Amino acid sequence: MTTIPAAAPPAPRQSAFRTLLGTGVGNALEWYDWNIYASFAIYMSRELFSSKDPTSAFLETMGIFAVAFVARPFGGAFFGWLADRIGRKHALAIAVIFASGGSLLIAVCPTYHQVGAWSSLILLLARLIQGLAHGGELPSAQTYLSEMAPPNRRGLWASAIYVTGSFGLTLGLLFGVVLRDTLGSDAMNQYGWRIPFAAGAVLGVFAFWIRERMEETEAFEDEKKAGELKKSLVREVLKHKKIALQVIGMTCGLTVAYYIWSVSTASVAQKNLGYSTNDAFGASIIGNLVFMVSLPLWGMFSDRFGRKTNMLIAMIGCAVLYVPLNNMVRGGNEFWRLVVAICVMLVLLGAYLAIAPAAYAEMFPTEVRATAFGVPYAIAIALFGGTAPYIMSAWAATPNRFVIYVIVLLLISAATILTLPETKGIDLSYHPKFNPRPDDVATS
């Protein structure tokens, strides 16, 4: 197997702090938005839907939550196009304004009592806007971060994406607990649930201010000067349809395993397995904190040993340990069981997630990097990650069926990763081996 030699690190165009803050603050907002909607759905359902059937109202609220996943591929296409045509930093700035606007719309949404079914439609519109924004956030952010990072430290820098995302998720969890304990149930039902969405809107404005002051990546500016951006984006993206299918294959197992163990396991343990609310919440917090600590370590590991090594450790390790860890959680309701299972699985997944932004960016040439990655990735998230909670619920009576489903997807991802070349440390300004330009082919 041939590995492309690492390029010499370029001179920094802006401070590492500004780069990491600019990409991280919007990414944290995405995960924050996603978590607070799920956390406060019970309160929203009472205010924005008919109160005649509370169960139906809650299911409708969660149905609108799922709509955001449907919108993600369209967001990946739109914001990926922006990133590949007008620049990474501008796409990032516009995406975060969309996310902020969606949060604000939810915060000020009139109640069902005030406007009837219009309240549900406004919530749907807000989630569509957020889905578009979040579908474009990750490909734009990881493309920008990967292109700004020194080639020999790209794995380490890439780990910041999921560190900040996990921070946003944890912030949403803590915010929910503080509000519930401080305001009480009556105030939460009346107005308290709106507060975290208003805070998210303010955070979005702050993120926009930071992102508009960031510098554009040198890789994008080089492509612009070379005239590569004048080519048909659709035609150029279609040239890489095989790699797009590889993105879906390598992501399907990752996204299902992550959504289940990062979010759903604690809820299922509380609802179905006899764990207390405090134990379930505490295990989730501890697991995500351990996960965040592991990410930079995995990033540095990949900068030395390669992206494929990390990804295979994650997918094969999770497939092998999935049944034992699942049985550990179900073998009793002791707190330590839940903590150990979540921590082990998230640390393993961290081996892939830490370097995913770098690995995906290294698969595509500069002129189509955000779009060609963003669309298939969003499709994988929508098809597999977005449906995971529903499939798990539908197969609740036969849980082994879902376990087999996840393991099969993990093995599909591992098999797909084996077909990839190693890309550690390549120069993202030019991609001569995997995606040669026509004139390169002609002269080779």
Image: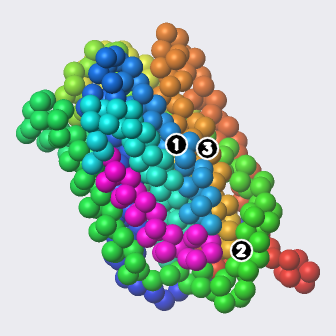
| Mark closest to the chain's N terminus, 3 or 2 | 3
Q: Nearer the viewer, mark 1 or mark 3?
A: 1
Question: What range is drawn magenta here?
Answer: 82-106
Residue shown at the point (59%, 22%) measured from the top left: 404
Q: Position of residue 376 (x, y in %)?
A: 65, 51
Mark 1 touching mark 2, by CB under 8 A? no
Q: Circle 2 sits on which residue?
A: 431
Disc number at residue 380?
Answer: 3
In the image, residue 46 lies in the stretch drawn in magenta: no
Give the quadrant of residue 16: bottom left
Mark 2 element type: loop
Residue 304 visible, this angle: no
89 versus 48 height, above or below: below
To which residue does mark 1 refer? 69
Callout 1 crowding tier (Cα within 10 Å): few <14, some 14–19, many ≥20: many
Residue type (three-letter) at the residue carrying disc 2: His
How far from the left and from the top, in percent, is residue 176?
Answer: 21, 40
